[in-house]
Image (cartoon, rainbow, N blue to C red):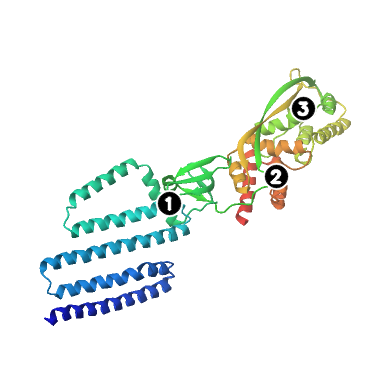
Amino acid sequence: MWSDIVIPLAVFAAGLIATIWLRRFAYHAVERWAKRTKWLGEEIFFQATRVPSILWCLILSSALALAVSVVTPHWKHWANKGLWTLLVISLALTAANLMGKYIPLYEERLKATQRAIAISRNAANAVIYFAAILILLDIWGAPTTAIIFLIVLAVVVVLVAFRETLPNFLAGIQLNARGQFKVGNYIKLDTGEEGYIKEMNLTDTLIESPNGSTILLPNRKLVQSTVSNYGHLMKKAREPFHFFNRVHLTELTGLKAKNLKELADVLQTAPDSIIYYHTHHFLEEHHYLTPEPANDFAVWVSDALGDDVLGEKIANVDAFEFPTLSALRERIVNVIGEYISLEPELRRAPAGREFYFMKSTSVVMSTSYVARDLREFVEALRTLSLGSLYFHIFESRLRLGRVTNDFSVWMKDSLEEQELAEAIEKVNPYTYTLEGVRSQLIQLIEKRINQS
């Protein structure tokens, strides 16, 4: 009868009109939501679903028409299976297409590597196709229990095989989602590792430490540790600063003095190594004392000769004011000479308490610390030895022959940090302990870093 054909066609037409109207309504709703939320994936969604959505309307309309048709139950059964199969395949392909475009879009915004994007895309496709296959097997009545068991077994084997990699992969996803760290940031872990982030992927993070070495950190460690992020790259120096250390070899000279005149006479012709030893070794060996400890000459005059007045005058000679050891020697000799002119009666040291002149020879050694900017410099400054600090602060002034130090010279010449260099020059190292000097320098440099 004509109704056997007209009714299914009418249902098909009505269903197609209704589903196309619903499709249009859904697209308008997505468009309004995307504008309100500023969603970046709107265009991708429309492009990926525009054609498949028409096919879905046709499939649903055909299913409705088939339900009211006079086709035998046997053929209806197989026709429905075919329609559902077509729908599942279409949905799976569309979902894979969407994931293939969304994953690069969002992971590029998170600065993920191409490797991470490829892994994420493949993982998403595997999940989509796996779900589609299971649904199709169920539609056609195939046994799925055994297949699911084998797949679960395979997943367990993979998890066991990649038990070290998987936590790092999940941690990498977490780090990317947070956007907490970026390439170029300077980070420091509570376990001691620190440096600039050179590369990040979904399993590991590569950082370059202040001494120039590279450290590969598992992402799991970044998530589990307390990490300080100091932010962006600093201005690079034209030449890196290499930290040095040195040790002193002390030698007896055979020279000695029993009174002030003999002390002054030896000092007038003594080499700089003798002056350096007796005015600076006490300072380094007793770096924990503040204010500045006395020099050996002042101590001998007070203790061996019993002349506290002259001892105090010699102790008050500020080594910071003299750019050279020759100038420092001249000042000490003048103080002694002026005192002798006023007190012609010379005191004599008891036997065995004579002043024995020593001299110092320095052996300079390089360290592993290298700084290319202020942040690397201050991090190295926190941990380098007091001997290295002493070398660059005290010995450099005498080596350079001017009232400055190696740090200020580098900051002026290589970093063009004139104000910071001058501020460091103004720190009188003779009025602090060595740890106090370190603390003062760190405060000045960190203040400058925070201003940049």
> Which residue type does callout 1 highlight?
Ala
The residue carrying pointer 3 sits among few (fewer than 14), some (14 to 19) or many (20 or more) residues within 10 Å by Cα, namely: many
Badge 2 local density, few (<14 within 10 Å), some, or many (20+)? some
Residue 443 at x, y percent in the picture: 62, 49
Judge whether residue 287 can be spotted in this image.
Answer: no
- Residue 410, disc: 2
Residue mark closest to the camera, 3 vs 1: 1
Is residue 312 left or right of 383 when viewed as pictured? right
Q: How much space separates mark 3 and mark 1, taking CA atoms? A: 64 Å
Residue 438 visible: yes
**Residue mark closest to the camera, 2 vs 3:** 2
Q: Nearer the viewer, mark 1 or mark 2?
A: 1
Residue in the picture at 69% in, 41% down: 429
| Pick the front one: 335 or 245 | 245
For badge 2, the amino acid type reads Trp
Relative side of 256 to 145, left or right: right
The residue sitting at 60% across, 41% down in the picture is 380
The residue shown at (11%, 68%) is: 73
| Earlier sequence position, callout 2 versus callout 3 | 3
Q: Amino acid at mark 3?
A: Ile
Q: Which mark is residue 116?
A: 1
* Number of numbered callouts drawn: 3
